[in-house]
Amino acid sequence: MSIFENKEQEFTPISKLGEFGLIDLITKEVKRYNHTTLKGIGDDAAVIKIGDLCQLVSTDLLVEGVHFDLAYAPLKHLGYKAVIVNLSDICAMNAIPTQITVSLAMSNRFPVEAVEELYAGVRLACEQYKVDLIGGDTTSSTSGLMISVTAMGTAKEEDIVYRSGASEKDLIVVSGDLGAAYLGLQILEREKAVFMEDKNMQPDLHGSEYVLERQLKPEARKDIVEMFMEMDLKPTSMIDISDGLSSELLHLAKASGLGLQIYEEKIPCDPTVMSIAEEFKLNGVTCALNGGEDYELLFTVAQKDYDKIKANPNMTVIGYMLDKNSGTNLVSHDSKIFPLSAQGWTAHENKK
Ligand code: ADP
Ligand code: MG
């Protein structure tokens, strides 16, 4: 009997658990049957031992109307981005991506030319990152477009970096700059709303090129992983920034069983992020903390390695790890302490 036929059964709305609660529920009774599974659920990618090397695997599903809006996301960009978000998860393990599979579900509203556009983006990402498209699945859908990419990569076991490896006093570092992708999305949403009001309106995108590119054509930081190898630096922990700096910091702290402190003034934001944020009556740093989709790397390094990163323009130290009892806090410009939260930092003052 299907559970839906059981009239006695009381149902729990998924919204009650939230994304992380739901993942916990469906994964808590998962058993491991193979000793080759070094890491299963709970990091950016799973780790499988094969001979002397490890295979990394990560998968993500993008759904029309939830993760993208075809009113402003060109299909070629969408194909590119769907690959990139997965390559980013492989890079977050300090590994080099090597292969992808791509699965599609499309409604009959999509012509052949749309599929060609989408795959032009997929192929471009493969070319840029030197990964091979090795398979996938194609099916019809009753509503919209869904695209699921699985990325694989390889690394030596001793080079793999997990979320859980940070130690007290390690420095917290981010690559690149943050907050731009979120503002790119705000601009696209604003221009879509203007266009819906008046179909003759042309979008006003002048001066927004950088944030739009960050939203529509993000990159995975494979170059940073290669830099680590050249510098002979192994981060102690790492995660990619897909859901906003705040949320990723909480993941690192939880996985490593530690607390941490970061400084508002250290968070790297492009100057255009600060000015565009103001246009939207937002704070650039809040966009970095809560926005997401930047696909930069957030990692920790031992203090002894500070000299290796201090002059690197791609890396910014934003704080350090503390013991668990110290909490997970942001120190503001005016030296107030705010606890970080996945939704953002709640603005109640703490004693210092
Ligand atoms: P990320 O943001 O890096 O893509 P997620 O937050 O999506 O990671 O997932 C967290 C962990 O939970 C990952 O290890 C992922 O593989 C696992 N996971 C997510 N959804 C499922 C599912 N439906 N079944 C099994 N594992 C899942
Ligand atoms: Mg990730």
Image (tube, rainbow, N blue to C red):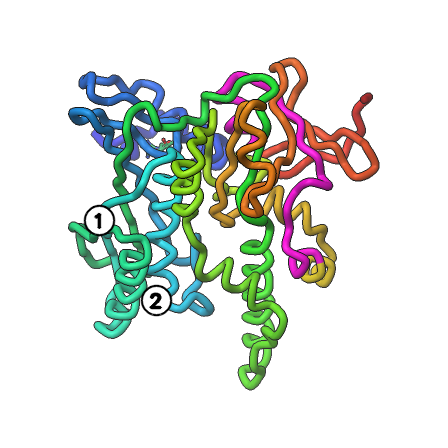
Quadrant of image for the N terminus: top left
Residue 246 appears left or right of 14: right
Above or below, 46 against 286 in this view is above
Above or below, 248 against 49 in this view is below
Residue 296 appears left or right of 168: left
Residue 240 appears left or right of 307: left
Quadrant of image for the C terminus: top right
**Which disc is residue 186 wearing?**
none
Above or below, 68 against 291 in this view is below
Part of the protein shown in magenta:
249-274
Report the residue marked by disc 1. 101
Which three-letter amino acid code belongs to the residue tagged 2?
A: Lys
Helix, strand or loop status at disc 1: strand
Which three-letter amino acid code belongs to the residue tagged 1?
A: Thr
Of residue 62 and residue 236, the one placed in the foreground of this image is: 236
Q: Quadrant of ligand 1?
A: top left
Residue at 55% in and 86% down: 200
Report the residue marked by disc 2. 76
